[in-house]
Each structure stands twice: as C-alpha cells, then as structure tokens.
Image (cartoon, helix red, strand yellow):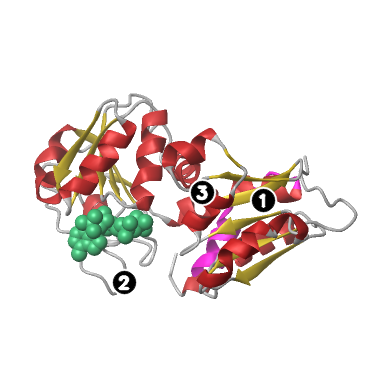
Amino acid sequence: MILTEKRNSPPRAGVIGWPVAHSRSPLIHGHWLKVHNLAGSYERIPVPPEEIDAFLRAFPDSGLSGANVTVPHKEAAYAAADDIDDVGRAIGAVNTLWMEHGKLQATNTDGIGFLANLDDCAKGWDKNPGIALVLGAGGAARAVVWGLMQRGFAVRIANRTRERAQALADRFGGDTAAHDLTEAARLLSDCWLVVNTTSLGMTGKDELPLDLDRLRPDAVVTDIVYVPLETALLAEARARGNRTVDGLGMLLHQAVPGFERWFGVRPTVTPALRSLILADLGVLG
Ligand code: ATR
C-alpha cells in the first residue's frame, strides 16, 4: 500500500539530519529498492538547524513521500508533525515521517526495531516475561522501555544520573523502577533480559562497568551498540554461556516500517543486508 500522495512519479524518501553523511539509512533502503526492483529513491538530506523548521513546513510541497529523521532534528520533527501516532507519543520522539491526506504524519520505529531484532535473533525471549534490566535512560532507552512494556516485562532502569532513570520510570509508570548504574550488578540475579542502551562499550568510549557474576544463566543480553558488533558486555555474557543479541539488527529492523509506508513493499532483514552494512562499517560479522 503506497501512501504517497504524488503517484505520478516514483516515490522519494530520505534521511534528514545534520550532519547526515554518516547515516547508513541510504545503504539499507537502497538495498531494498534494488532487491525489490522498485522505482524510487532514498537520499541523504542535510538540513542545517536554522533551516529545519522551514524545511518541515514546506515538506508537503517537497515531493518527498516521507523521511527518516536523525540528530539533531528529532525534536523539530516532533513539533512540526500534524499527527503523531500512539507509539511516537508514548516514546516522546519520532524518527519516521510520511504524508497522508496532505498531512505530515510521524511515528517512532526504534521500539519496534528493538523488539523485532530480539524476535529474530533470540526466539522465545518474551515467552515468560519477567524483569528486564535497562542500562541507560536516554532517548534510546525510552524506545526500549516502551517495547519491553508492550511485551509485559517489568523494567528496572539503571543510569549514571539516577534522576533521568526516575523520569523515565515515571513516564511509563506500571512496574518500572529507577536505580543508580552502580546497583545494576546486584539487580542481575532477578533479570531475564539485560539491555545496554548507553554509549558505553562503543569503539572509542569507556567500557560499561558491570560485573556479570550474578547474571542468570538463562538471561538474554543485548546491546544497542553495534560498533564493535560484539561489545565487551556481549562477549563476556557469551563466554558465560548466555544468549546474546548484537545491536545491528535493531538498526536494520527499525527501517522496515518506513520503507513499507513509502515504497509499498514490506522488506525483510536478511544476512545479505547485514553483510552489506557490516562491510560499510568496516566491522567483521
Ligand atoms: P541516546 O539518545 O542515544 O540514548 P543520550 O540521551 O545522550 O543518548 O543517552 C546516553 C546514555 O548513556 C545515558 O543514559 C547516559 O547516562 P546519563 O543520563 O547519566 O548521562 C549514558 N552514558 C553516557 N556516557 C556515560 C558514562 N561515561 N558512564 C555512564 N553512563 C553514560
């Protein structure tokens, strides 16, 4: 189902950011356009901060069917959208835009991408949802906590800045609780799932300070960092015999709903796509 309003020419979409050169989205969507033999394009759209409001106001006349939005324009997109769906509102940020009935619509696909990656790589991970431990309380954590609550998990949020963890717990309510990052190791004995949403463990950053001694043998451990593909957290968990899921799948899966809306075909995340992105990142799969 193609929702673009300009059906007389092939659909165009892109990623709006500043800078935007580093974005892998053109590679992902370009791969799917090719695989499905579709007429359409996906571009990098660099928009400086001082121009973003005017750019978004003019979006309906731009000829674009939709777009992804990346840093630093997520707040501007949230403010400019005519309609934000329930998911975008619950997470409080949007990363995907499309035109519908002349109006700019927005959603957030990070939470769905997070869940789809686990569904894909850790079958049965949510069969008996218990307690999940989320490390970090930034924008990515918001999407992850939303996703985990959709699947019925109780969520413990541990963050360096405890107030941010508390604000996140308060945002979602239900069975959520906030902790200092230093409490994370103690919490592990009750957790079925551990998710790193901080930037720690990324190439060039410090390692995540977390002692895994109390990690349950049946816990699944996942990271949203994907450079390196296997972070020290994942390597240590794997060495202990735990199931681990790397963060690249979340990046790939979060792109699926946007592509489907703009180009009318639901694409799949395949080993070929993973290899393509890994090669571009210079990371060994
Ligand atoms: P994003 O939107 O990508 O999640 P963010 O909002 O900057 O980015 O959040 C980054 C997360 O990594 C936060 O939880 C941050 O902790 P604070 O809320 O205390 O800033 C966490 N983080 C970043 N550097 C860290 C470090 N050196 N030690 C511990 N946590 C860190």
Secondary structure of residue under mark 3:
loop
Identify the amino acid type marked 3. Val
Q: Is residue 241 left or right of residue 89?
A: left
**The one of 80 and 34 positioned closer to us in this rendering:** 80
Q: Is residue 116 left or right of residue 224?
A: right
Magenta segment boundaries in residue numbering: 264-278
Comparing labels 1 and 3, the label whose residue is closer to the camera: 3
Judge whether 154 appears above or below 284 on screen. Answer: above
Identify the amino acid type marked 2. Thr
**Residue linked to disc 3:** 94
Is residue 149 located in the magenta-colored stretch of the structure?
no
**Residue linked to disc 1:** 259
Secondary structure of residue under mark 1:
helix
Q: CA distance from mark 3 to mark 2?
A: 27 Å
| Sooner in the amino-acid sequence: mark 1 or mark 3 | 3
Ligand 1 has an atom within 8 Å of the beta carbon of the residue at disc 2: no
